[in-house]
Image (cartoon, grey):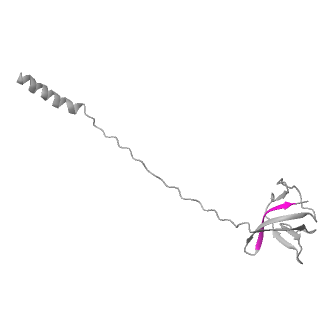
Amino acid sequence: MVRKTIVALACVLIASPAFAQTTTRHTTTTLTTVEGVTVTAPPIISSQEGSAAGYQPAGTLVIRTDGANPERFDMFGPGLVYDRYGRPVRGPIKAGARVVVFYSTDGYARLVDHIVVLD
């Protein structure tokens, strides 16, 4: 009987490593950070109201105001002119049309952000 017990224990000791798990599974979590993006642009500083002058050099808008001298604004590209309802205006601005110019200052130049034609 003792012999059967010793044989049984020997079989258990030999068999248990055979059924043991041989690989270990590790889970690794990696955190990544994304840097923020900073956008810099000239802010819209002011608006100027007046009426469009008769002569408009290419790339500029000249408006007459209550002051003695007409105001001059630099324009870059189409798609900046809207009517008072927000619809794009096609074609040139007619002389004498009441306008509001929204602009920013970049050094010495006043750059047009958008123009609203009131008439």
Relative image position of residue 51 (x, y in whole percent): 90, 67
Relative image position of residue 97 (x, y in whole percent): 92, 63
Relative image position of residue 20 (x, y in whole percent): 25, 33
Give the magenta-colored segment's residue range: 109-117
In the image, is 36 to the left or to the right of 75? left
Q: How many circles with numbers are drawn on the protein?
A: 0
Q: Residue at x 77, y 71 (%)?
A: 110
Q: Is residue 118 above or below residue 65?
A: above
Residue 90 falls in which quadrant of the image?
Answer: bottom right
Residue 37 falls in which quadrant of the image?
Answer: bottom right
Q: Would residue 112 be counted in the magenta stretch?
A: yes
Q: Would residue 58 be counted in the magenta stretch?
A: no
Quadrant location of the C terminus?
Answer: bottom right
Q: Is residue 42 above or below residue 27?
A: below
Quadrant location of the N terminus?
Answer: top left
Q: Residue furthest top?
A: 1
Magenta: main secondary structure equals strand
The answer to which of 35 and 45 lies nearer the viewer is: 45
In the image, is 31 to the left or to the right of 5? right
Relative image position of residue 6 (x, y in whole percent): 9, 27
Q: Residue at x 87, y 60 (%)?
A: 117
